Image: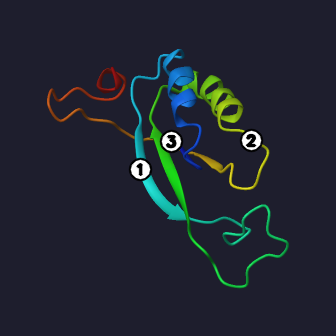
C-alpha cells in the first residue's frame, strides 16, 4: 500500500501517469494537515508557533510489490514542485485483500 499526502494541484497529471503503469485503482480523500513547518506557507519569513492546518489530499493505492518502485518514481516525478508542501509518501505491506462482491482474495481481488 502506498499512501501519499500532498497538495491538490497536480492530481490530474498524476492520475494519467499512474494509469500507464497498470495501477487499477486509487482512493483520494480531501484532508487537512501540516508537516514540520506547522502550516507555514513558503513565502512567509518565520515558522508559526501554532499549528495551522492546510488543505491537502491523501491518495491511497494498493498494488503488487513488483509495481511499487515504478509507482514511487511516478509519484516523485508528477507531484514534485520543489516547494514546501510537496508532501510525504508512506509505504506499508498489506496482509490480505478480499473483494466483498465476489469473495476473491489477494492478487485476484486487485484486478
- Inter-mark Cα distance, 2 to 1: 21 Å
User: Crowding at label 2, few (<14), some or many (≥20) Cα neighbours within 10 Å?
Assistant: few
Question: Residue 18, percent across and down?
Answer: 53, 24
- Direction from residue 9 to residue 61 in the image, left or right: left
Question: Residue 85, percent across and down?
Answer: 68, 55
- Inter-mark Cα distance, 1 to 3: 20 Å
Q: Are marks 2 and 3 in contact (CB under 8 Å)?
A: no
User: Crowding at label 3, few (<14), some or many (≥20) Cα neighbours within 10 Å?
Assistant: few
Disc number for residue 29 = 1
Q: Earlier in the sequence, mark 1 or mark 3?
A: 1
- Inter-mark Cα distance, 2 to 3: 28 Å
Q: Quadrant of residue 62?
A: top left
Give the residue displayed 69% in from the left and 28% down from the top.
73
Question: Relative to the observer, which residue lies in front, 89 or 97?
Answer: 89
Give the residue displayed 51% in from the left and 41% down from the top.
93
Residue under pointer 3: 93
Question: Relative to the observer, which residue lies in front, 79 or 1?
Answer: 79
- Direction from residue 86 to residue 96 in the image, left or right: left
Residue under pointer 2: 81
Amino acid at each position: 500500500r502506498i499512501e501519499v499526502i500532498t497538495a491538490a494541484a497536480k492530481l490530474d497529471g498524476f492520475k494519467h501517469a499512474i494509469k500507464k503503469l497498470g495501477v487499477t485503482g486509487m482512493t483520494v480523500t480531501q484532508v487537512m494537515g501540516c508537516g514540520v513547518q506547522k502550516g507555514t506557507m513558503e513565502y512567509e519569513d518565520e515558522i508559526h508557533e501554532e499549528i495551522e492546518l492546510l488543505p491537502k489530499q491523501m491518495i491511497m493505492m494498493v498494488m503488487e510489490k513488483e509495481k511499487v518502485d515504478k509507482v514511487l518514481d511516478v509519484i516523485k516525478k508528477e507531484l514534485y514542485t520543489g516547494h514546501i508542501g510537496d508532501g510525504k509518501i508512506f509505504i506499508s505491506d498489506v496482509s490480505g485483500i478480499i473483494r466483498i462482491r465476489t469473495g476473491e482474495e489477494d492478487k485476484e481481488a486487485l484486478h
